[in-house]
Image: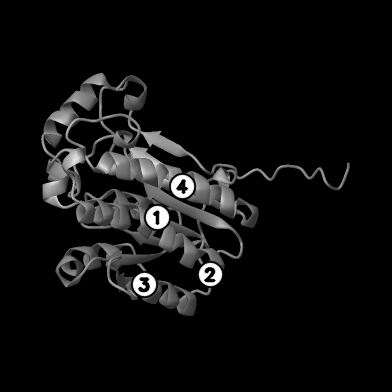
Amino acid sequence: MDASLKPYQLVKTLDLTGKKGLVVGIANDQSIAYGCAKHCRAYGAELAVTYLNEKAEKWVRPLAEGLDASLILPLDVQKDGEMEAVFAEIEKSWGKLDFVIHSIAFASREDLHGRVVDCSRDGFMMAMDVSCHSFVRMARLAEPLMTDGGCMMTVSFYGGRKVVEHYNVMGPVKAALEATTKYMAAELGEKGIRVVALSPGPLKTRAASGIDHFDELMEAAAAKAPTHQLATIDDCGSFAAYLVSDLAQSVTGTTLFVDGGYHIVG
C-alpha cells in the first residue's frame, strides 16, 4: 500500500479525554453554554469556565465546580485586559488549548425592542462587539495555544438568516457572526483549527428572556418544526461535544442547526 494512503483510523466512541477547553457564556443551569460544558465534561474534557462579574459568580461557580472545572475565571469581554488575563492563565496552567465555546450575546433593551432602523449607533456597536467581535478576539488569543489544531465554536440563531419578528438588531449581528465564522475557518484551516457556529432554535434561556413575545416564538417554532418539539440545552451539548471531538475533524466553516428541523420550514 502506498505510504500516503494510510487507513482511516476508526474512532469507536466519542472521547474527549486529554482535551482542554474554554467555555464562555454560562449564566445558569439553563444556559446553552452549560449544556455544552456538561456534555464535554461527561466525555472526558477538562474545562476552564468564565463568569461575567461578581454578581454572576454566585450562580456560575457552583456549576463550574460541579463540572470539576480546573479554572474558574472572571471575564467581561468589554473590560480591557480581562480576556487577555483568561488566556494567560490558560497558557500558564495548561500550555495548550483544544477548543473554545463562545456563547455570549448582548444588546441593550431599548435597541433590542426597537426597529433596526431606529437602533442607536452606540447600541449597534455594543451588540456587535459583545456578540461578534469578542469571538474574533478570542480566536486571536486561542490560535497560538492550539498547537495541535482545535475547534472554535460560537452560537448563532436562525434570525441571522431570515427575518424573525422581534429579533430586531440581533438579526444583523448574528448574520455578521456567521460570516465571521466562515472567514476565520478559511484563515485558520491550514493550522488544523476548525471554526463552526451552532444554531439552536428558540430556547428558554436567560438571554432569550429579553426578546419581546419570546414565548409566542417558542410555541410557533415547536408547532412548525418537523419534530414538533424544541431542542434542549442537552441536544446542543451532545452535538457540541461531537463537534470538538476528533470525529468531526473535517467539519468547519459552517453553521449547524439543532432545531428539530425548524430552519427548513420557518
**Front position in the image: 218 or 111:** 111
- Residue located at (47% from left, 80% from top): 92
Q: Which residue is tagged 3?
A: 71
Q: Is residue 261 above or below residue 22?
A: above
Mark 4 or 1, which is nearer the eye?
A: 4
| Residue neighbourhood size for the residue with mark 2, other residues' Cα within 10 Å, grouped as few (<14), some (14–19), many (≥20) | many
Q: Which residue is tagged 1?
A: 101
Quarter of the rendering containing residue 135: bottom left
Its colouring scheme is one colour
Q: Name which residue type carries label 1.
A: Ile
Label whose residue precedes the other's in the sequence (4 or 2): 2
| Residue neighbourhood size for the residue with mark 1, other residues' Cα within 10 Å, grouped as few (<14), some (14–19), many (≥20) | many
Label whose residue precedes the other's in the sequence (3 or 4): 3
SS under mark 1: strand
Q: Which residue is tagged 2?
A: 96
**Front position in the image: 43 or 163:** 163
SS under mark 2: loop
Q: Name which residue type carries label 2.
A: Lys
Q: Is residue 218 visible?
A: yes
Q: Are marks 2 and 3 in contact (CB under 8 Å)?
A: no
Q: Is residue 41 visible?
A: no
Q: Are marks 4 and 1 in contact (CB under 8 Å)?
A: no
